[in-house]
Image (cartoon, rainbow, N blue to C red):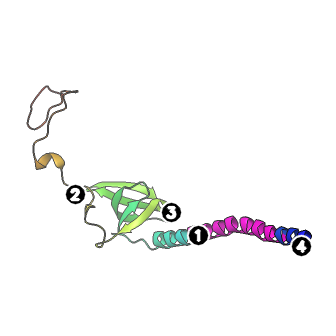
Amino acid sequence: MYSGLALAASQGSGVGSLLLLLLPLALLVFLMLGQRRRSRETLAMQQSLNVGDEVVTTAGMFGRIQALGDGEVDLEIAPGVIVRFDRRAIGARRNAADPPGLPAEPGAAEDPVADGPVADNPATGDRTPDNPGKES
């Protein structure tokens, strides 16, 4: 009688060991498939870029595409300021449906100093619009 219980317990632990081995492997496969899908989507977006598209680089720089090369993109990040990036550095395309907190044009963010008085920094004595202070 006890030998039958021992046999059943040993068979049950074999299935448990197999599950402990297969669950992490299944998780890794799931993660790899998700990453592969994201990579394909990013590659398709980077290949479909056109002159005039507003984009964001992977470093967070906003700009408008001025020229496209085989592996390079020239971005206008401010009026008259053009920088060159590797095409793979383009992280996303911006469009009219983007959240309103982002500036519509690069450099179009509101100037917080122009909205009202700014207190000077007592540690450095820097001038502000309200306090002429010392010259820097």
Q: Compare residues 108 and 8 and report the one nearer the observer.
A: 8
> In the image, what residue occupies the spot 38% across and 61% down?
56
Q: Magenta span has 108?
A: no
Residues marked 2 and 3 touching at CB (< 8 Å): no
Q: Quadrant of the N terminus?
A: bottom right
Amino acid carrying label 2: it is: Ala
- Magenta region, residue range: 11-36
Q: Residues within 10 Å of mark 2 (few under 14, many from 20)?
A: few
Q: Which mark is residue 63?
A: none
Q: Position of residue 90 (x, y in %)?
A: 44, 62
> Which label lies toward us, 2 or 3?
2
> Which type of secondary structure does the marked residue at label 1 adopt?
helix
Read off the residue under disc 2: 108
Read off the residue under disc 4: 4
> Which residue sits furthest front?
1
Q: Which mark is residue 71?
A: 3
Amino acid carrying label 1: it is: Arg
Residue 61 lies left or right of residue 111; in this view the side is right
Amino acid carrying label 3: it is: Gly
- Which of the marked residues, 4 or 2, is nearer the chain's N terminus? 4
Task: Please say if 109 is above or below 100.
Answer: above
Q: Give the Cα separation between the discs numbered 4 and 2.
A: 78 Å
> Which label lies toward us, 3 or 1?
1
Task: Please say if 116 is above or below 52.
Answer: above
- Which of the marked residues, 1 or 2, is nearer the chain's N terminus? 1
Q: Give the Cα separation between the discs numbered 3 and 1.
A: 21 Å
Read off the residue under disc 1: 36
Q: Give the Cα separation between the discs numbered 4 and 3.
A: 69 Å
Residue 40, picture quadrant: bottom right
Amino acid carrying label 4: it is: Gly
